């Protein structure tokens, strides 16, 4: 009976993760079809060394102020297509949307890069593609938010404004679901897409990573806007209260949206866009 229960759960977890993954994953062909009728198309760059690789989609003139977009887990650069397609944004900014290390075409080896600091340092290389000489607006959502924050801590002179959206920042509020532990089992991982396994590895290292970030919040000295939905089922809304505590006295704006879920950049895209434009 135990074997059949395990088998059932294995099939259930595989099915759920597969359905979830297919909802946002795009093939190269689908990406080409998406941009086939667009007047402005992205250019792609790969930044690489012996240990890490970063794939970057660039749209807009590289002499415009940079807008760096960092996705969550799982995710990809094209998770920001709504912003990339926006003609007002890419005529005002040089948009740089990355595949975080390990995701999409930023894969280098099989080992997951779960370090927030290592990811922040490496993603910062994308800013070298910009030649405006102006500081960047950096937007990170979900698991990309603490990475964006760490990037701003490390390179404050290169950042003009920071947006943290649906941000899991409080190590005491990390959410785990009943099926999470099954995703850590090797037999289950054999059946799952590598992006799901990478997201699982990040999730189970996230508490420790956020604890390392705790004493560093006083070093964040760039203007920051935080947005959190009251009906976010992935990130506990009380993370906004934690942000208010660790950013007390900082140039920070806290926006709580009671009816919003996790995907604020989609559900409130107009608001996010207007806030970004106000920073220009």
Image (cartoon, rainbow, N blue to C red):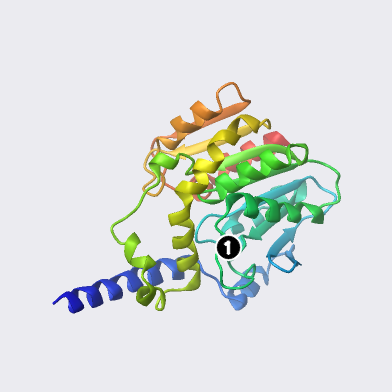
User: Which element carries disc 1, helix, strand or loop?
Assistant: loop
Q: Residue furthest left?
A: 1
| In-image side of 50 versus 201 (left or right) | right
Residue 85 in sight here = no
Q: Is residue 30 above or below residue 96?
A: below
Q: Is residue 209 above or below residue 73?
A: above
Q: Nearer the viewer, residue 40 or 14?
A: 14
Image spot of residue 100 (x, y percent):
61, 60
Decide: few, some or many residues near mark 1? Use Cα within 10 Å; few <14, some 14-19, many ≥20: many
- Give the residue number, with chain letter if any, for mark 1: 76
Q: Quadrant of the N terminus?
A: bottom left
| Closer-to-camera residue (247/81) | 247
* Residue at the (85%, 50%) spot, across then down: 63
Which residue lies at the image location 68% right of the left edge and 36% below the top edge?
A: 161
Count of marks overlaid on the render: 1
Q: Is residue 103 visible?
A: yes
On the rendered structure, is 227 left or right of 61?
A: left
Q: For residue 20, which quarter of the picture?
A: bottom left
Q: Quadrant of residue 231?
A: top left
Q: Residue 278, relative to residue 57: is it above or below? A: above
Image position, residue 123 (x, y; %): 68, 55
Residue 7: x %, y % from top left? 24, 77
**Residue in view at x 33 percent, y 73 percent:** 15
Considering only vertical position in the picture, is 31 above or below 159?
below
Q: What quarter of the picture does the C terminus occupy?
A: top right
């Amino acid at each position: 009976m135990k074997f059949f229960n395990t088998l059932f759960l294995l099939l259930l977890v595989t099915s759920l993760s597969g359905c979830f993954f297919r909802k946002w994953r795009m093939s190269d062909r689908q990406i080409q079809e998406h941009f086939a009728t667009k007047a402005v198309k992205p250019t792609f760059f790969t930044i690489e060394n012996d240990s890490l690789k970063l794939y970057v989609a660039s749209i807009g003139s590289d002499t415009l102020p940079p807008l760096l977009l960092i996705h969550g887990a799982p995710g990809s650069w094209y998770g920001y297509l709504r912003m990339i397609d926006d003609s007002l944004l890419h005529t005002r900014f040089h948009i740089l949307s990355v595949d975080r290390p390990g995701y999409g075409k930023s894969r280098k080896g099989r080992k997951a890069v779960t370090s927030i600091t290592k990811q922040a340092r490496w993603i910062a290389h994308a800013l070298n593609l910009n030649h405006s000489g102006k500081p960047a607006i950096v937007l990170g959502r979900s698991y990309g938010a603490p990475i964006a924050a760490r990037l701003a801590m490390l390179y404050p002179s290169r950042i003009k404004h920071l947006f943290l959206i649906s941000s899991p920042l409080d190590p005491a509020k990390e959410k785990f679901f009943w099926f999470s532990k099954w995703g850590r089992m090797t037999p289950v991982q054999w059946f799952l897409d590598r992006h799901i396994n990478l997201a699982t590895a990040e999730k189970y290292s996230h508490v420790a990573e956020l604890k390392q970030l705790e004493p560093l919040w006083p070093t964040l000295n760039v203007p920051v806007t935080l947005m959190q939905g009251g009906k976010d089922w992935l990130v506990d809304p009380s993370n906004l209260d934690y942000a208010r505590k660790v950013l007390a006295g900082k140039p920070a704006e806290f926006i709580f949206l009671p009816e919003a879920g996790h995907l604020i950049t989609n559900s409130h895209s107009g608001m996010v866009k207007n806030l970004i434009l106000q920073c220009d």
